[in-house]
Image (cartoon, rainbow, N blue to C red):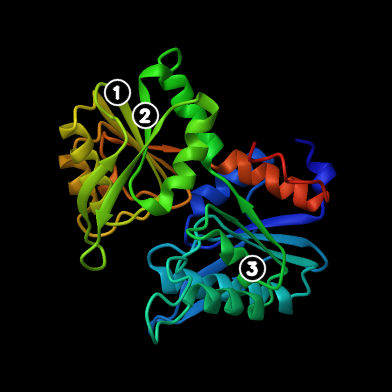
Amino acid sequence: MNNGVFADYKIFAGNGNPALAEEIAGIMGRTPGKAEVTTFADGEVYVNLQETVRGLDVYIVQPTCNPVNNNLMELCIMIDAMKRASAGRINAVIPYYGYARQDRKAKPRDPITAKLVADIITAAGADRVVTMDLHAAQIQGYFNIPVDHLIGKPILTRYFQEKFEGNWENVVVVSPDHGSVTRARSFAKPFDAPIAIIDKRRPKANESEIMNIIGDVAGKHAILVDDMVDTAGTICNAANAIKKMGALSVQACATHAVLSGPAIQRIQDSAIEEMVFLNTIPLPEEKKIDKIKQLSVAPLFAETIVRIFTNNPLSNLSA
């Protein structure tokens, strides 16, 4: 890319996923802007911008992944610093939007934390949010500023298209629960593959129990599709059940590798042969196992930033 064309924007990285920010900037022929983002001894976040942003478009790449609260505060304080330094437009690039699972009142006296976080980011001074695969798409409406909601599915489908090229008649796409049926159907559509649905009951938070499989998986290569994997109970139980029902192999994919608690061990011990994630959340060394593969979202975010800056449409990016 011609650096001179894009002379009026800068990319900054928080501590949420600096490697992704560097990769995005590298694709655009740049390096991330200089900023000190650290903490005081008592844990308070400290931000110091070490170069000018006056009048510029700034893009802060910061997923609000674990540690969620620290990363969220880093993002908000970086936004505030940019605003007080007279940045032109402040764009919060949030590859993974934390608190998205609390998007409605599921029972009396529940908070709607996804809306609260949207209000906090807006109040901090963000002019736009760029995110990917929200747990609930309606969260876009919680913001009173523009939200560009990117879809990770094309990156994943391209990978599996190459993997199963010429053999799609023996593939079934599986939704691990009723909430992911639309996602599984969309994933299967380009390949005209059938879908199956796992009917499960969840006795309590972060625990799931497989009850039934709707659809035929016997003698087929199954691809489980979800938006995120947290403790991996749902997807691993689904994989084991599918294998018992006669599936030839079980692959799985998701956008966000949250991977809390026993997730890595569960994936390692499960019937899943390969678990494919996007790199919206960094994968620490201790969580890197042979079964897990990460695909990069950097080219998509780089193209998105260019189009935002040049006021070009994003509608065909998720095709």
Q: Earlier in the sequence, mark 2 or mark 3?
A: 3
Q: Are marks 1 and 2 in contact (CB under 8 Å)?
A: yes
Determine the CA span between mark 1 and mark 3. Answer: 39 Å
Circle 3 sits on which residue? 141
Left-right relation of 301 to 127:
left
Circle 1 sits on which residue? 220
Query: Looking at the image, which residue is at 52% across and 52% down?
Result: 133
Residue 54, horizontal then vertical, whole percent: 80, 69
Tell me the SS state at disc 2: strand
Query: Looking at the image, which residue is at 52% across and 72% down?
Result: 74
Tell me the SS state at disc 3: helix
Residue 210, horizontal then vertical, whole percent: 21, 50
Q: Is residue 56 above or below residue 159?
A: below
Q: Is residue 142 above or below residue 176?
A: below
Left-right relation of 69 to 268:
right
Circle 2 sits on which residue? 172
Instruction: Bin the neighbour count of mark 2 within 10 Å (Cα to Cα): few under 14, some 14-19, many 20 and up.
Output: many
Checking the image for residue 236, the label placed there is none
* Disc 3 residue type (three-letter): Gly
